[in-house]
Amino acid sequence: MRWPLVDYCAGLIVLLGLGLPWVQATAAPVKVFILAGQSNMEGQAVADLDGKDYNDGKGTLKQLLSEPGPAARFPGLRTAEGEWAVRDDVWVRYQPEAAPLKVGPLGLG
């Protein structure tokens, strides 16, 4: 059985070992996070659905941000208008198995 994530990580390690010569050095460090997981890592987590099928919204991101404490800790998740924020300071590249490549700023879903 082949494990695509193992192949991907092995390829990434090889690239990092080469020093990525085509990438220009920057003065500030760049944080890189590799997110690996199942459907939640693909952006399929329930963020704002209500109703009995979704535990009446309990445990969703929308419900979490309705509480003052968590909302104050995560101010960048919503815009001033209350919409889900698109993070232009975070860049995402994701290749779904049977769909087009997704590249761009981080947004919900």
Image (cartoon, helix red, strand yellow):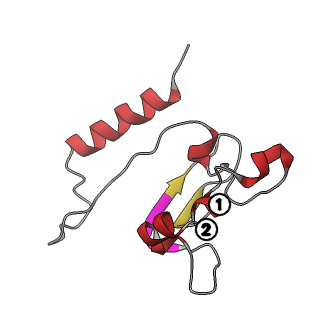
* Residue 10 rendering spot, x and y as whole percentages: 35, 31
**Residue annotated with mark 1:** 63
Does dot 1 land on a helix, a strand or a loop? helix
**Residue annotated with mark 2:** 66
> In the drawing, does residue 58 fall left or right of residue 28?
right
> In the drawing, does residue 105 fall left or right of residue 101?
left
In-front residue for pair 36/80 = 80
Name the quadrant containing residue 47: bottom right
Whether pointer 1 and pointer 2 mark residues with C-beta atoms closer than 8 Å, the reply is yes
* Residue 20 rendering spot, x and y as whole percentages: 25, 53
Q: Which residue is drawn at 64% across and 49% down?
A: 59
Let me know if residue 25 is in the magenta part.
Answer: no
Please, what is the dominant secondary structure of the magenta stretch?
strand
> In the drawing, does residue 26 fall left or right of residue 34?
left
Q: How crowded is mark 1: few (under 14 residues within 10 Å), some or many (20 or more)?
A: some
* 77 is higher (above) or lower (below) than 38: below
How many tags in the picture? Answer: 2
Name the quadrant containing residue 109: bottom right
* Residue 21 rendering spot, x and y as whole percentages: 21, 56
Span highlighted in magenta in the image: 87-92
* Residue 41 rendering spot, x and y as whole percentages: 56, 45
Does dot 2 land on a helix, a strand or a loop? loop
